[in-house]
Amino acid sequence: MSLAAALLALVAAVAPVQAGAPAQGAPPVAGATTARDSIIGEQVRQIASELRCPVCQGLSLQDSPSELAQQMRQVIRDQLEAGKTPEEVKAYFVSKYSEWILLEPAPRGANLMVYVLPVLLVVGGGAGLFVAARRWTRQPAPAGAPLPEDEAEEPETLP
């Protein structure tokens, strides 16, 4: 029995393999993803949805089927895997393409008009409609009705 115990101890020491886990140095199983890969994949989707496709222009990198968009998504993935933050990745694309590449530019400088002007137009239009509606609903004075005291006074004559 001691020979069997020694053989069992030798096998246990030489081949410690966890159930279900690939052996060390073995290629990863197709379809298996790690938590890091899924986090990076989600970050790639988030950043790509915030950047404009230079080819399609109306679509984000995430939604664009163009080859350039696929290459740009790979650049995003490479930079995230290299340890850059999402803000650094966006700054990289802004340095290459200017703020035009951002689907939602930062509200400062001339870009501030994009955020403020629609609000001002809606408020101004609402005020204009309010004034116009009051004028339209005001009843005209009957022809023989006396004028209010303010308007009944005689106009001053100029010398």
Image: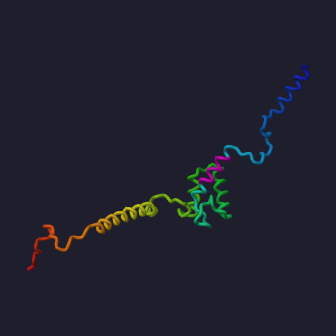
Total number of numbered discs in the rendering: 0
Query: Residue at 80% of width from left, 34% of height from top?
Result: 17
State yes or no: residue 60 in magenta: no
- In this image, 76 relative to 115: left or right? right
Q: Is residue 25 above or below residue 79?
A: above
User: What residue sits 36% from the left and 64% below the top?
Assistant: 124
Q: Which residues are magenta?
A: 37-46
Say which of 40 and 92 sits in front: 40
* Residue 59 image offset from top left, x and y in percent: 59, 63
Q: Is residue 57 left or right of residue 37?
A: left
The residue shown at (49%, 58%) is 106
In terms of depth relative to the viewer, which is nearer, 98 or 127?
A: 127
- Left/right placement of residue 91 relative to residue 37 reads left
| Coordinates of residue 99 in the picture (x, y in percent) | 53, 62
**Quarter of image, res 34:** top right
In the rendered image, residue 116, in percent from the top left (x then y), is placed at 42, 61
- Looking at the image, is 29 positioned above or below residue 51? above
Q: Position of residue 141 (x, y in %)?
A: 21, 70
Image color mode:
rainbow
- Location of residue 100 (image quadrant): bottom right
Q: Main secondary structure of the magenta part?
A: helix
In the displayed structure, 23 sits above or below 50; it is above
Q: Residue furthest bottom?
A: 159
Residue 40 in the magenta stretch? The answer is yes
Q: Quadrant of the N terminus?
A: top right
Q: Quick one: 88 or 37, which is closer to the camera?
A: 37
Q: Residue at x 45, y 59 (%)?
A: 108
Quadrant for the C terminus, please.
bottom left
Residue furthest out toward the left: 159
